[in-house]
Image: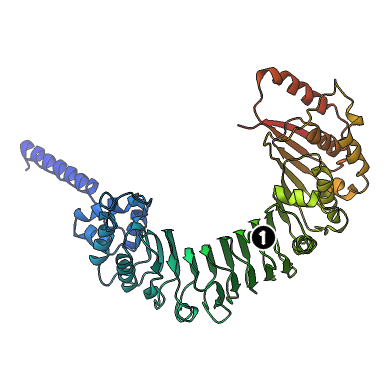
Amino acid sequence: METRSAAAKKKKLSFCKENELISDHHNIDRITDLPDAILHHILFLLPIKTVAQTSVLSKRWRSLWSSFPDLDFTTLDQSLQPCSSSKTNPLNCKESDFITQVLNNRDKHSDIRILRFQARLSFSRLNGLIRLAIRHKVQELDVEVFTEDYFNFPRCVIASDTLRVFKLKSKRPGFRLPPSSVMTSGFRCLHSLSLSRISLCNQPSLSDMFSESSFLLLKKLSLDTCFGLKHLRVGCRVLQDLTLENCFELQGMNVLGSKLERLRIVKCFDGYVEKSWVKIDAPRLGVFLWEHNGLSDNVSIETLSYLHKASIGLLHEDISVAKLQSVSNLFSALSLAHCLTLESNCIEILSNNNYFAVYLHQFSNLKSLELHTGFKKNNVPGLASIFKSCPMLHTLILNIINDFKTERRQWNKDLWEMSNSEEEKYWESQAQNLKSFLHHLKIVKIHGFLECENEVSLAKFLLKHGKALEEMVLSTGHCKARHSLQRQKIRSQMMGFSWASSNAKITFIQAG
């Protein structure tokens, strides 16, 4: 028969074992037991040096670090600005040594999925780093460098069978491309190519580098700051996205792409080169951005039946007869767009040429229109021409540029009768021409609204004749205290205008 003391001892022993099990349960390292792929994903969210420091925790974590597939050294936060002395900021800096050490100490059987780094270094060291990455079968390579002199494009990447994404950006001074025959001999798996600050003084024409028979898997191409580039032809078979920026010396461009969906041309063509030309044949183009470019003498764009979004910004210049036709061809190509943005210089060109009052093409599919304008007096007929060409428009966004250089007459009903103003008389004369536009317009947003004559006249006209209008948002800036009472009075008077739509509402927003 068990004594009372023995039973108590047995109970105490059982209690201690339970506590020990509970303690062991709480001390289990569940993170370490996660699969490598999940831990690698978590580590990718941390700065690269923090990830490296986890290697001292255990053999398991050391193995995770040596096989870490996504190496982003841009988190080292080093400056690429030119230095005044090589002694104070040498090219072969400790950061690039760290990158080299990491690549050299990697598990030889672990491939690199992503490698990104920014460094100030010599070409020989840059070439060495890229060679190490290629040996580890890197898939995405993103390099931004500063060198003391121009360097040659690292040819070792051309022969890679694993590289899918390659970005090379030189902060200063730039790099030279090899001949087209060399560039097109490799890159068998490349899907995306981005090159920035290229010196093409010895080969100003890239007419055969991006042809139909080269870069067979390339879907995305970006060329930025190409010094000396005068002629470009792009016809890669499966290309879907093309961006060209800061190529001011460009004189001729030919883009052919049966699968091209997005085209962005920014700050190219200076507008003063004679006989410049643009030819675009991309029937599936859905996004077309032509921003801050000079106008070419000859613009030929095939019908863009799938165009959804377009943005046009032209450098303001005197328009010759030939360039007048180029503007017409450009707008004709955009006639099927659903969303359109026009920068202020486009408005100036359309306003200063009576040609477009008659021959501006209809945007029959356009649902959203965004206009940037100084809204000067001479812009009013140009705006009316644009509205007339948008018979099915749903949303109008007007961004008024207030540069304070142009005198704009403040609206004050106590001083003069609004119905006798020149602007209002003009808008009233256009009511019949704009009938379809006014019967479909539902939303109007005016940013930079300063209660001046031009914008108040337009707002009153849209309220008076907009039968489908549902919402008008007028966004204003801050005003001085002595003007706040006048502003409130003007707003009250606007609320008293006659409205064609019983569903319409006006909202005043004070922008920050």
- Measuring from the top left, give residue 87's x and y in whole percent: 25, 51
Residue 65 relative to residue 366: left or right: left
- How many marks overall? 1
- Measuring from the top left, give residue 278's x and y in whole percent: 68, 68
- Measuring from the top left, give residue 201's x and y in whole percent: 50, 69
| Displayed quadrant of residue 310 | bottom right
Q: Looking at the image, which is closer to me, 17 or 84? A: 84
For the residue carrying disc 1, how many other residues have a C-alpha within 10 Å: few (<14), some (14-19), or many (20+)? Answer: some
Q: Is residue 246 above or below residue 83?
A: below
Q: Amino acid at mark 1?
A: Tyr
Question: Which quarter of the rendering shows the N terminus?
Answer: top left
- Measuring from the top left, give residue 481's x and y in whole percent: 66, 18
Q: Looking at the image, which is closer to me, 169 or 200? A: 200
Question: Which quarter of the rendering shows the C terminus?
Answer: top right
Query: Helix, strand or loop at disc 1?
Result: loop
Mark 1 = which residue?
272
Residue 31 in view of the camera: no
Residue 93 relative to residue 194: left or right: left
Residue at x-position 80% and y-position 57%? 363
Residue 132 in view of the camera: yes
Residue 407 relative to residue 223: left or right: right
Residue at x-position 83% and y-position 58%? 362
Q: How is the image coloured?
A: rainbow
Residue 349 relative to residue 8: left or right: right
Q: Looking at the image, which is closer to me, 444 or 233? A: 233
Q: Is residue 71 above or below residue 238?
A: above
